[in-house]
Image (spheres, coloured by chain):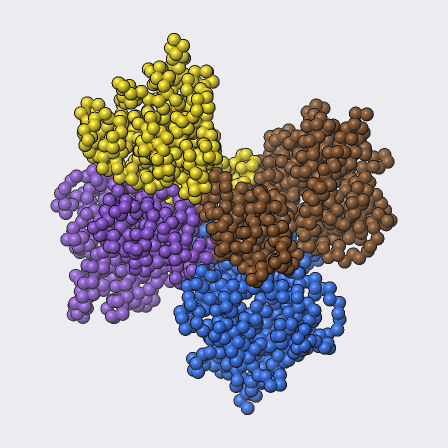
Chain colours: A brown, B blue, C yellow, D purple
Amino acid sequence: MKKQIQFADQKQEFNKRPTKIGRRSLSRSISQSSTDSYSSAASYTDSSDDETSPRDKQQKNSKGNGDFCIKNIKQADFGRREIEIAEQEMPALMALRKRAQGEKPLAGAKVVGCTHITAQTAVLMETLSALGAQCRWAACNIYSTQNEVAAALAEGGFSVFAWKGESEDDFWWCIDRCVNLEGWQPNMILDDGGDLTHWIYKKYPNMFKKIKGIVEESVTGVHRLYQLSKAGKLCVPAMNVNDSVTKQKFDNLYCCRESILDGLKRTTDVMFGGKQVVVCGYGEVGKGCCAALKAMGSIVYVTEIDPICALQACMDGFRLVKLNEVIRQVDIVITCTGNKNVVVRENLDRMKNGCIVCNMGHSNTEIDVASLRTPELTWERVRSQVDHVIWPDGKRIVLLAEGRLLNLSCSTVPTFVLSITATTQALALIELYNAPEGRYKQDVYLLPKKMGKRDTHIHMSTGNPRVQAKCKFTS
Amino acid sequence: MKKQIQFADQKQEFNKRPTKIGRRSLSRSISQSSTDSYSSAASYTDSSDDETSPRDKQQKNSKGNGDFCIKNIKQADFGRREIEIAEQEMPALMALRKRAQGEKPLAGAKVVGCTHITAQTAVLMETLSALGAQCRWAACNIYSTQNEVAAALAEGGFSVFAWKGESEDDFWWCIDRCVNLEGWQPNMILDDGGDLTHWIYKKYPNMFKKIKGIVEESVTGVHRLYQLSKAGKLCVPAMNVNDSVTKQKFDNLYCCRESILDGLKRTTDVMFGGKQVVVCGYGEVGKGCCAALKAMGSIVYVTEIDPICALQACMDGFRLVKLNEVIRQVDIVITCTGNKNVVVRENLDRMKNGCIVCNMGHSNTEIDVASLRTPELTWERVRSQVDHVIWPDGKRIVLLAEGRLLNLSCSTVPTFVLSITATTQALALIELYNAPEGRYKQDVYLLPKKMGKRDTHIHMSTGNPRVQAKCKFTS
Amino acid sequence: MKKQIQFADQKQEFNKRPTKIGRRSLSRSISQSSTDSYSSAASYTDSSDDETSPRDKQQKNSKGNGDFCIKNIKQADFGRREIEIAEQEMPALMALRKRAQGEKPLAGAKVVGCTHITAQTAVLMETLSALGAQCRWAACNIYSTQNEVAAALAEGGFSVFAWKGESEDDFWWCIDRCVNLEGWQPNMILDDGGDLTHWIYKKYPNMFKKIKGIVEESVTGVHRLYQLSKAGKLCVPAMNVNDSVTKQKFDNLYCCRESILDGLKRTTDVMFGGKQVVVCGYGEVGKGCCAALKAMGSIVYVTEIDPICALQACMDGFRLVKLNEVIRQVDIVITCTGNKNVVVRENLDRMKNGCIVCNMGHSNTEIDVASLRTPELTWERVRSQVDHVIWPDGKRIVLLAEGRLLNLSCSTVPTFVLSITATTQALALIELYNAPEGRYKQDVYLLPKKMGKRDTHIHMSTGNPRVQAKCKFTS
Amino acid sequence: MKKQIQFADQKQEFNKRPTKIGRRSLSRSISQSSTDSYSSAASYTDSSDDETSPRDKQQKNSKGNGDFCIKNIKQADFGRREIEIAEQEMPALMALRKRAQGEKPLAGAKVVGCTHITAQTAVLMETLSALGAQCRWAACNIYSTQNEVAAALAEGGFSVFAWKGESEDDFWWCIDRCVNLEGWQPNMILDDGGDLTHWIYKKYPNMFKKIKGIVEESVTGVHRLYQLSKAGKLCVPAMNVNDSVTKQKFDNLYCCRESILDGLKRTTDVMFGGKQVVVCGYGEVGKGCCAALKAMGSIVYVTEIDPICALQACMDGFRLVKLNEVIRQVDIVITCTGNKNVVVRENLDRMKNGCIVCNMGHSNTEIDVASLRTPELTWERVRSQVDHVIWPDGKRIVLLAEGRLLNLSCSTVPTFVLSITATTQALALIELYNAPEGRYKQDVYLLPKKMGKRDTHIHMSTGNPRVQAKCKFTS
């Protein structure tokens, strides 16, 4: 009863999703698919001209198991190779697998998951399995599934329900197939975006009686969990993986230091040496971008309004400017302020011919791209993610990813970084699953620093053998 | 008469080519095609399932001109966009075009060229045309033509004879079509590899009477010119562009500083931060690799036998080691010594699981790849240019480009660098074409530092507006 | 009455001082006097062989004013030059002087101060004066006064009571002379260490009725203010300058990045390039040391137990080690952990001949220097602040500053950094003096970010014209 | 006879010395004395108020030996400590001493030397002695002798004739005492500046019959040897140590990278972070200065006229400017072009208040200091080597070392670098002394790369144990 009332409330809450989450999903799917285009995966997927929906096919793996629904089981070998590549760059997860598989800390765990289905996720799933868990999995995004990885997982005995290019109806059907199985009921949820959690809340609220906890990775999903908690409607403990300290440290400074170079190079083949660059914003992302470009021989200018960050830019050797002071002379403009309309039409009008403009910040609103969609300007798509916008006098600027996040759209997220998140997810599942009664209430938690031994989670998830060596893992 | 005897000699000389040049051409074509796979060009080329040979087609551009032979004139728009991208990163050439088009220093020049047909070459050809030259062009490699660029050139009125995937017979047919035209005779040669020069020597020796000079870019072609000169058989002056100082400075230190990151990232998505890397050799290439990886947060070790270079490595903060001291612990091994068998099977046997091995040196012999082709090791091609070599105990190493040059095989050569060469080629043509009688004998020359005004050629070809601004161009 | 009881309490509280503060004062005086030995000041002071106590002399400046007590008024010209040098590197204070002297925000303020009497303090005092304040000043340390600066101040009309080499009795006498003047009563206190505040509490508690606030700079003084506040005995508002954000940011990372090089160079003339260095601790201080030494071509190892800092060290390209792994091979050992006994006798026994050992951390306990005071080891003082400790087999290590803070003992604190503190002190005085009734209670405060206009204090105190230019100063 | 004629010629040649060499000697003595002021040595020297000339004193060391002439034998203990400090930073020489003392490659050698008498020279002399040589030594500069080091050498049994503050007459008297000894005749010359060589040529030409060779270190001395050789008057082989590859590599890039920071810090205590600096010239010295300042967080601009160096500056991330573009905004101006009048009065007039101006180039003519000696400008000496030049409007610039070389005047030359030269000198003596008849003619030589085993000299003289370990020393 109480649940039903809750459900009604929930509904309303979740109704915000279509706009909000919908857009987010889209931008993520674009990022993932762009990633695909650089991997060998692309070709296998493209070459498949089978138009039958996976839902309509009879599917079986080589052992005769058919409890999955994917695009094409024949791609399993290709997928296995992608997984093997990923394993090389996921030392944290592989170490966890090795250290903990003796004691099987997830024995008896029935994990239902909803994430991007990529090689990195496959390494996570196979780790959970090695630790004793049973897994059923769906995709959290209709575009992001690597079909050959899904095939390799299905071939390996995982119940995976996902393919690239699902319809919205397919999307929910897949999630439902994961959850709704005669004689099997999940006791752990691993979610990315909150859609799986939402579905269980809406359709199978009674399931929560057996569920020991939720592990959630995304900003959006965590936000929804906090709302539920605030409203008193969260009925199991939840772990917020998104805000874990290792993830935060990595995702900005260290990750962007590499992806700014990668993203610019793949899209434009620009040589960095000797180029003049203005970076708008000197937070962690800006610091990473500036350090990388300085090291490659670019001359870097910084705009920044916060006095402490501005001072840091100065002391790190960057010339602090107002955008207008340098806009006519720079070769590259990079936004990473987190604010809106940092680069506006007036700035764009003054840029020199050939100037590259891109965004590394937190949204697609830092560059006022809308202001460029006027009749007198010609847009020319010259490559994937690369547009030339041409002024009447022939001047052209090079706009990357239409102002969306360059690091998601035009470079790969290093597997190493994904490994940190995945390890934290696995440790969070272990913690929630094994926690003594009463340690966690119906609330949202960060993974505790100390798990048995001190700082285990941070030591492990760094993935650095030197750091890991400093602690002994005990679940 | 004399010419005929010479021709016989020539023949023998050129007979070395099939092995030597053949291999080189192959390695270059591979590099180019790999580059293609990251550009938009790839899809247009692939989607074309027209199997008719270009030679068998009736071809005309939109103005009715048909003096060309390419794959598909309809791709001209796509090609034009690639050219426009290239123009953004070829400031040296564009500046030359702008500065010199008033006086048309190549008015009357009839240039026959044989180079890779890429967007960058197109910018060069259109610059020569703006400076007054007429051009006819063939490809110097059977794989490296960007069909859509060839289409754009043909549409623009250039007589281009080239397509991707020519047969050897096609190759010589195209060259012949450039040279052998009723009522038109070249007075300048621009060659890359020496095949065009060879063809004229062999078939049309009399043409040399009207030819004012040869401009040659490649190591191989230059080598052949020096042999001709030594043998007293060079019958026109030639400019050696390959050894120009700007090219040398760029191709090693600055170029490799960027391409080592690019090549590793595109093939493996490895995160550089925190990785342990050993770089074998601390010459210019090694210096570039080390500087880049250090800046990205890698821990870099260096092996070096020359005491001065070793000292430089020490003073630059790199730990000098013998390969064996660190081979068990490093994540990445990079060779750039210029020597043979720097990394041998014994080293490979001792590397840790997941170690990435690649070569940035001068040949494909630094890593003893042949030693890995033994029955107990399994090779798995996981991506284009990426092999996993797997030991019986499951250990795998990640071998890039089968030990060939990473920067040519797995990253793009920045357009900016190509621009330097192209500008030097253009300046060399201008110099030879305008030189007063007697300034150049029948010998091989480097472009003189002073062309009218001092250091013009270096100032211009740097492509850096600040550097260029320091001199006034006068032909 | 109530005050008297308080005073009794206070007394006990202050009785802790002799051990605790006494030691601190001592260590500071050493640092300052060592600094002197590099400045021109030293010679003037030394050459003065006048043994009469300043208290016994009749003193007058050139205008006939005699309300001061210093060593030798004749040194005023030399002092003026030192002040002029300091002004060059105190842009924040000079900008404040320039911007605010029109409105005289300290008109009517009667400031009694007790700080080190150095050229930098002189710039502060003359700024306060330009802003309208009257000042009387004593030294907070018996050794740290620059006599020639004191002379310049006295010549300029300031009532200064301080000389180098005061007795303890002199010390309190000077403070009393500042405070206890017929017909003059302070309304603001500027203190460094809390001795002045203590004296007024003890001797003239009624003075607090007219005092608008206390500005305190030191850790110790701030600590005592918080104790008073906690005990309910703080009777005026106080500003904690020590913990201001700009000071914190500067004093560690940026300042140590420079002083580690300066301190090592002045004491040992060591060449950094190619040296192997282990830095113990990768907090802000360690980060600064590592960055500087890496840039100079040293090979740097890091020890660190905190996993996040350890990870940062890895990602910044430093090899994470245990001290014992590298102790035999390193040329320099630097401690900056903030912990005790980081380098112990066992480590010292294993160091190689000539190893340099020094401390950049927060105390003199990181290196277990006491363990080196054993009969079998010979100590040889080879220079000021430099000891050779010699083992029976002839091995010697080079110990700097007997394990005290290298940056205070063996290098100068950049005037630029002192400028930041001084500006914050001036702004704090302005804020407290002008605050409307009730804004500040009898408590300890940090300077608010917003003073009229937003972030003024931070903008101004950075001293960077680019940062300052981003705000308008309004008191 | 022939010798006498030669002598007459020589005389004329040497007559150029007083101006040329005289100035050089002066600048070097200044550099050494400034160094002294930071070392413990200074005080011992200064405190000695004994005015008797050493030549008038009866001198004996503790063993009764009196064949020397120095200031004060009682300072021997202090000198020994300075030598011990120096040994720590002269690994190349100490390694040579250790490796070669078994075979005594200089047994029988009688070396007469004339160099700066410093702790570093003492380490060289004691090494030569350990290798079997007998030594007699004088100073090559009247100011540069460290008296306490001379005392330690005399105490140790060396025949040293030198003190700080010799008259010109003393200078030649000391040299003569080294050479002219009953029953002892030198067979090797080690010279720095050519004065000793000159003296023997002039006074004892017959001595050359027994002399096996000359080792010369300075630019000037080498220049004179080449002149002698050219004129056919060089009568023994000579080794040019000045142009050895290791010395060249070190003295510029690596040495200046450290001494620019040291020189600026010791004179001005300036904080580097956030400062704007213009470096004139991007040769090796400029590259070192720029790299160091960039690493410390300065914003660095470069002026350069050579197009290749200009390009390197661009590609290394420095903004290429004309001096006038930035002269108003920079905080520090550094010259290192090797040209005259790089910074002229007009530039100085436009600098902002507080700008620091110094020279790292090859002479004292890069800054037009003479132009500042005009009536309207006031000069104020604020510290040793630091002048404020004050304009009528109050603007002051900070001129260091009156425009002479900052690295010689205001910082120490790292002992490590001197070690390289000293090792090369020792190896050159070994080579000449042991060379088979006929290997060396009466000419000037560079030390051969191969001495027995390959590259020994370079390997050894690097002083880096890792580099040294790569070769086996054999004399």
Residue at the far top in the pictured view:
C1
| Residue depicted at 78% across the width and 48% down the height | A166
Kindly tell me whether residue A74 is visible in this rendering. yes
Depth check, front residue: C79 or B104: B104
Q: Which of A380/B113 is in front? A: A380
Residue A211, x across and y down, in percent: 76, 30
Residue C265 or residue D71, whichever sits in front: C265
Classify residue D357 as left or right of residue B261: left
Percent x, y of residue A78? 74, 53
> Could you tell whether C157 is left or right of B272 in the image?
left
- Percent of width and height locating residue C234: 43, 18
At horizontal 69% and vertical 37% (from top left) the residue drawn is A221
What count of labels does the image hold?
0
Residue at the (63%, 50%) spot, across then down: A370
Is C164 rendered above or below residue B419?
Answer: above
Name above or below for residue B223 compared with residue A288: below
Q: Residue furthest front?
A: A375
Q: Nearer the viewer, residue C194 or A83?
A: C194
Q: Is residue D63 visible?
A: no
D101 over C268 or under it: above or below: below
Q: Quadrant of residue B472?
A: bottom left
Q: Residue at x 63, y 63 (%)?
A: B81
Q: Is C255 positioned to the left or the right of D365 in the image?
A: right
Position of the N terminus of chain C by quadrant: top left
Quadrant in which the C terminus of chain C is drawn: top left
The percent coordinates of residue A461 (x first, y second) are 63, 38
